[in-house]
Image (cartoon, helix red, strand yellow):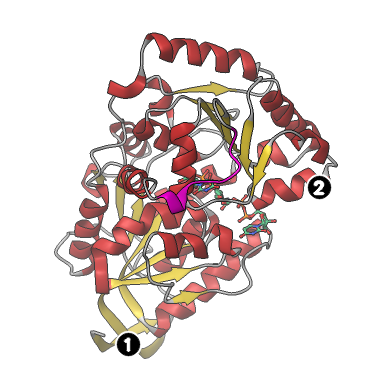
Amino acid sequence: MNTSATTRIRGGRIDDAPDDVGRIAVVLGTRPEIIKLAGVIRELGDRARVIHTGQHYDDSMSGQFFRQLGLPAPDRVLAGIGGADRGTQIATAIGALTEEFQRSRPSAVIVQGDTNAVSAGAQAANYLGIPVVHVEAGLRSGDRGMPEELNRLVVGALADVHCAPTETSRANLLREGVPATRVEVTGNTVVEATLASIAAAADPAVAVEGVPVGEFVLATIHRPENTDTEPALRRVLEGLAALGLPVVLPLHPRTAAAVERHGLRSLLDGMTVLEPVGHASFIWLALRATLIVADSGGVQEECTVLKRPLVVVRRSTERPEAVDAGFAVLVRPGDGLATAALALLAEVRQRPLASVPSPYGDGGASRRIADLAVRVASGTEPIQRGEGAESSA
Ligand code: UD1
Ligand code: UDP
């Protein structure tokens, strides 16, 4: 390890903290962050120090992705965060990450997306004056009822380098006053993650058993807006049943708990309900599905690489690109899911998706982001620090 000691002043105290010079801490906490940061971690190689906040903790939501994606186990897993409420998750993670970064100070911190892990990672790093690189920056739904939108605004204010996946997300950041010099359009790492899992899905070991023969719908649901109340979850499950096709439903733990809590287990009768599956298996299912129905963020991007039609069951989306390109249709509460699904299927029969390019890039985002982070960590990428970045603990 490339470690040296630097004297720095912290809130009037002078202390000697070991610098993990050139090391880049990658802070992640949930399933999609593991999938989308796998390529960046691989590109960084020995420079990466992976810190898992423990927000997702079941093997089916965390460990299986590290194994399947060929990643080493995280260098550190934080305690006391998984299953806690939102404020506790963020506060506990900021405290633990602050200790971690003080014990061994990385030269830069990478966070991805919009989860509580992202908010905590960006805050802990920024308050210690460590440069923050935000992957998948600049997405905005405009819906402040979504916890993720608030996390996006927090990291948008704190990040030093914003890796915007598309020109649309770059424009969102510029509109909020982020200097253009701090924004780089890198593409979304989901493209290479999906391409890798398409290749992995050729392995018969990845095939999912018990899937209906012939046409089926693949669904994944977990947003609070679709799970927290009985009427909302009932609406989605009844909407799925009304599609008139067999439904395959790998169940997110939030949704599994909500089904029990709201007494809706009977609505799953007739559906193929699975534990959360690994990424290659999910892609295996998606490639065979007639239609995908999801409230997932990542699946909205993946459908553009898989060239599969998607119905997004949400009141808003921060990912307009997939809808604009014709891969997806947004179905808000009160809209008819079955009507929208039939219209989308009819449209893609007229205008097949196979030749429509993904708006999320060329599959080189992970390499661009890793290169950028290395330049930031080595001080060769000029970073304009705002007032306040100087103050530390
Ligand atoms: C979180 C993210 C969301 C992201 C999703 C990816 C926030 C605010 N939300 O939502 O943006 O789309 O992850 O899947 O950061 N649980 C388990 N086992 C697990 C993980 C969670 O049982 O391995 C349970 C928790 O105990 C909790 C519920 O699922 O009761 C929700 O987990 P949480 O991480 O708070 O939010 P997600 O809905 O997973
Ligand atoms: N996914 C998976 N197994 C599943 C369901 C989803 O590997 O059983 C993948 C999916 O392909 C996508 C990611 O998980 O890459 C999306 O995660 P999720 O929907 O939990 O979070 P979001 O993207 O909404 O933040």
- Residue at the image point whose x is 35% and y is 39% from the top: 173
At label 1, the amino acid type is: Pro
Q: Distance between the Cα atoms at labels 2 and 1?
A: 49 Å
Residue kind at label 2, given as amino acid type: Glu
Where is residue 116 drawn, in percent x and y? 54, 56
Q: Name the residue under label 2.
A: 260
Please determine whether, in this image, residue 79 is positioned above or below residue 319. Answer: below
Between 11 and 324, which is closer to the camera in this rendering?
A: 324
Ligand 1 resides in the quarter of the picture at bottom right
In magenta segment, residue 166:
no
| Percent of width and height locating residue 240 | 67, 27
Q: Quadrant of the N terminus?
A: bottom left
Q: Could you tell me which secondary element the residue under label 2 belongs to? A: helix
Residue for point 53% across, 23% down: 330
> Which numbered circle lies on residue 18?
1
First reached walking from the N terminus: tag 2 or tag 1: 1
Picture residue at 26% right of the left edge, 87% below the top: 3
Question: Which region is colored magenta?
Answer: 204-212
Please, what is the dominant secondary structure of the magenta stretch?
loop
Left or right for 183, reference 157: left
